[in-house]
């Protein structure tokens, strides 16, 4: 299968994936939904990238835009998506068929609805091998069995004859991974691959994805709302909010030195095991913005505790930090800056004032 | 794990709910086989306490929650709620008792009637029970909607699909509160929500619990969430209880191997923390034919012969900390006084 990858690789030296000002808008009755609004980044070969954000941040639409899996009607696409140096942003579904499977593959959140319930597992894995790689049926089934072993499904041979309903959620997700890996893709997109699974199974699936990525020198794009999931399993993280990229850095760089108050808020809202029980959680107030009428200025400003007038008026550009040219963020008053500290002091003071009022009222 | 026993039950006048030897089985077609969903568990909850139930899919945590509501009725065992036995209760008495305990479910959108206005949904229990006058009901619904952070005016005009997942969960919570229950069973209430919204809903539950003096049973598979909200946590595996302990104690000193496995599986949001290789392989065995002895023995790193033949009983390993394991990671203590 490695020969397949070599044959399709045009530009071995450049980045695997290069996005420039990608936009994906949808026409709806309410108006234009700006689901992805000007996102640029590059992804190197063999690296794992985490795309993180809340529901409605555009992370799923972004990964589907790259894959070319968008509804054909009412979708307005812009910008450039280069995969191995070749422009794929303007390809239609028919042209994308040569890319799907062999170069890019995707696994989804819900393994039950992504598998065909009335087709044997074996056939679902073998079929793409026959279609994309032109294998004989016998060869394809033998490869399917090997893939099942690769994704650690016990009794692979017997399992090939089973239907999806005979398997647990974790096993189905392994089958999905086997199907995605079947044609030896150069990049694998995993959209919330473990959200529907138990923690024990989640850990197994994340380990499996990491292992297969290394074995196959494949790039992995992990789309999730959980910073905990990406922390241990990615090289780089892109944080999205309101259809925009708001921070991007190496995983270590991001956690060590987060700049965007939104990234910080996402991290703080996760309940921590080290905290005592009944510790008040730092929820992010409000909801993600309406992408038909996104707020003026910084899109996070209505929910940002540190926002000042400038944030509500002017949109911050995506710039690099002083220390690391690869650490990008879009914020006027990033975490750690003077204005940020001033805002923190101000917030603490107003909280004290409020509790003083509450105490006085109580008396 | 996977043991029985009642050593952990408390003898207190404040016990709101006491479950003893609860068994729930479901027949498998006409094969004569049965799914052993819950196999003889005992638990108690004090007034104002939050009990967390954790475990993997299929461990019987949701079935336990439903069996408390008598939906469906348990196969055997006793459920005492506010001093009354529910398992033998019939008809109107049962309906009346159910107003005192309410449930919140995982999927907030499908648990609300899509064709009705949100305000009507929250009002419905009051209308059915003919509580107060029309004006009083109205005032009560408005007050509760306001408490959970939903604009009553908008709720009067809008249907559930016009609200986000987090807001729908707030509406479900409002609906569960209108009849002034003493116990709320929350079945994975935040599993379908984003972390940011999850934190909002958890904070809301804590606030409402304090304000209305509620007792909660909180069912979830996310241990960090359960730790945050619970006073006491029971870990379940394949229809049995492995370990019961005060929340902080359980996480500081897990005594059962399964509890350790669950804790180690949680992804830590810090790349500097080395990923500990998954300490457990495979998935739980089928509850149709559970393994003999300790039910966790097939996946347990410390299993020995006795674990495959003899079922461990819950015994004390610390203050309020009980474990059902032959070889717990914390040394058992003999309780002299109870």
Image (spheres, rainbow, N blue to C red):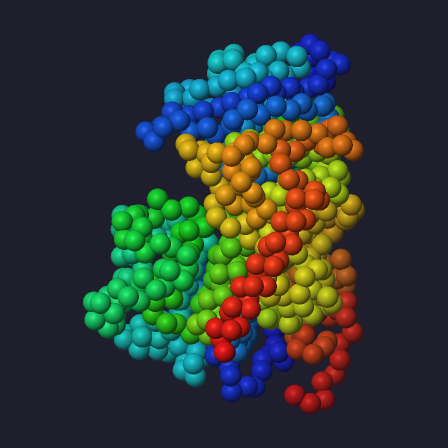
B74 in relation to A163, above or below:
below
Who is closer to the viewer here, B152 or B223?
Answer: B152
| Location of residue B17 in the rendering, given as x and y in whole percent from the top left corner | 48, 77
A326 or A206, nearer to the observer: A326
**Residue A221 rendering spot, x and y as whole percentages:** 64, 31
Where's residue A71, x and y in %? 43, 23
In which quadrant of the rendered image does the N terminus of chain B lie? bottom right
Residue at 66% over, 77% down: B320
Residue B169 appears anywhere in the view: yes
B298 left or right, relative to A301:
right
**Is the residue A133 above or below the residue B250 in the image?**
above
Q: Is residue A44 left or right of residue A58?
A: right
When the figure is inspected, residue B17 is found, relative to residue B281, above or below; the finding is below
Say which residue appears at 47% left-offset and 45% top-offset.
A287
> Where is residue A223, by image quadrant?
top right
Q: Residue at x 56, y 37 (%)?
A: A310
Q: Quadrant of residue A229?
A: top right
Is residue B292 shown to the viewer in this render? no
Of all residues, the one furthest to the bottom in this rendering is: B337
Q: Which residue is drawn at 48% across and 14% down?
A: A92
């Amino acid at each position: 299968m490695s020969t397949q990858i070599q044959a399709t690789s045009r530009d071995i030296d450049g980045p695997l994936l290069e996005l420039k000002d990608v936009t994906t808008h949808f026409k709806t009755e309410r108006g234009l939904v700006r689901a992805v609004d000007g996102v640029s980044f590059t992804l190197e070969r063999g690296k794992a990238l985490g795309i993180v954000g809340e529901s409605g941040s555009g992370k799923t639409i972004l990964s589907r835009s790259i894959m070319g899996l968008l509804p054909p009607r009412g979708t307005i696409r812009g910008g450039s998506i280069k995969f191995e140096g070749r422009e794929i942003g303007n390809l239609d579904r028919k042209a994308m068929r040569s890319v799907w499977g062999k170069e890019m593959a995707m696994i989804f959140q819900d393994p039950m609805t992504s598998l065909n319930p009335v087709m044997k597992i074996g056939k679902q894995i073998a079929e793409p091998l026959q279609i994309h790689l032109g294998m004989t049926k016998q060869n394809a089934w033998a490869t399917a069995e090997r893939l099942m072993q690769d994704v650690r499904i016990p009794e692979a041979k017997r399992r090939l004859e089973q239907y999806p309903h005979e398997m647990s959620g974790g096993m189905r997700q392994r089958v999905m991974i086997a199907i995605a890996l079947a044609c030896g893709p150069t990049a694998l997109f995993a959209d919330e691959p473990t959200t529907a699974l138990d923690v024990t199974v989640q850990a197994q699936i994340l380990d499996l994805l990491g292992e297969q990525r290394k074995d196959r020198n494949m790039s992995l794009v992990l789309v999730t709302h959980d910073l905990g999931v990406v922390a241990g399993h990615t090289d780089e993280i892109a944080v999205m909010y309101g259809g925009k990229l708001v921070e991007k850095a190496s995983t270590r760089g991001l956690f060590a030195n987060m700049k965007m108050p939104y990234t910080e808020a996402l991290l703080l809202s996760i309940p921590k095991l080290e905290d005592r029980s009944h510790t008040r959680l730092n929820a992010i107030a409000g909801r993600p913005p309406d992408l038909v009428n996104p707020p003026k200025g910084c899109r996070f400003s209505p929910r940002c505790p540190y926002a000042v007038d400038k944030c509500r008026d002017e949109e911050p550009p995506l710039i690099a930090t002083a220390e690391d040219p690869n650490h990008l963020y879009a914020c006027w008053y990033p975490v750690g800056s003077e204005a940020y500290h001033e805002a923190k002091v101000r917030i603490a003071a107003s909280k004290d004032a409020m509790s003083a009022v509450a105490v006085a009222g109580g008396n | 794990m996977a043991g029985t026993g009642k050593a952990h039950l408390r003898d207190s006048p404040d016990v709101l709910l006491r479950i003893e030897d609860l068994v729930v089985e479901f027949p498998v077609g006409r094969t004569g086989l049965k799914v052993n969903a819950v196999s003889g568990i005992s638990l108690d909850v004090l007034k104002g306490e939050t009990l967390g139930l954790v475990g993997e899919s299929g461990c019987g945590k949701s079935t336990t929650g439903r069996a408390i509501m008598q939906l469906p009725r348990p196969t055997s065992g006793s459920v005492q709620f506010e001093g009354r036995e529910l398992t033998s209760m019939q008809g109107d008495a049962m309906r009346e008792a159910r107003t005192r305990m309410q449930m919140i479910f995982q999927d907030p959108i499908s648990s609300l009637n899509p064709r009705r206005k949100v305000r009507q949904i929250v009002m419905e229990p009051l209308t059915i029970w003919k509580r107060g006058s029309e004006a009083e009901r109205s005032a009560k619904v408005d007050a509760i909607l306001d408490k959970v952070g939903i604009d009553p005016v908008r709720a009067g005009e809008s249907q559930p699909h016009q609200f986000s997942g987090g807001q729908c969960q707030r509406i479900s919570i409002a609906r569960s509160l209108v009849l002034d229950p003493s116990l709320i069973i929350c079945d994975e209430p935040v599993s379908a929500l984003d972390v940011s919204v999850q934190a909002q809903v958890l904070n809301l539950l804590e606030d409402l619990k304090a304000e209305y003096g509620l007792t909660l049973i909180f069912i979830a598979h996310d241990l960090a969430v359960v730790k945050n909200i619970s006073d006491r946590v029971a870990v379940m595996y394949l229809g049995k209880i492995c370990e019961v302990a005060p929340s902080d104690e359980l996480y500081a000193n897990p005594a059962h191997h399964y509890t350790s496995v669950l804790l180690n599986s949680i992804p830590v949001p810090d790349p500097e923390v080395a990923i500990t290789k998954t300490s457990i392989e495979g998935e739980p065995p089928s509850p149709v034919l559970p393994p003999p002895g300790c039910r966790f023995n097939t996946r347990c790193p410390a299993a020995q012969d006795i674990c495959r033949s003899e079922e461990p009983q819950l015994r004390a390993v610390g203050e309020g900390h009980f474990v059902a394991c032959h070889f717990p990671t914390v040394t058992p203590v003999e309780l002299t006084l109870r």
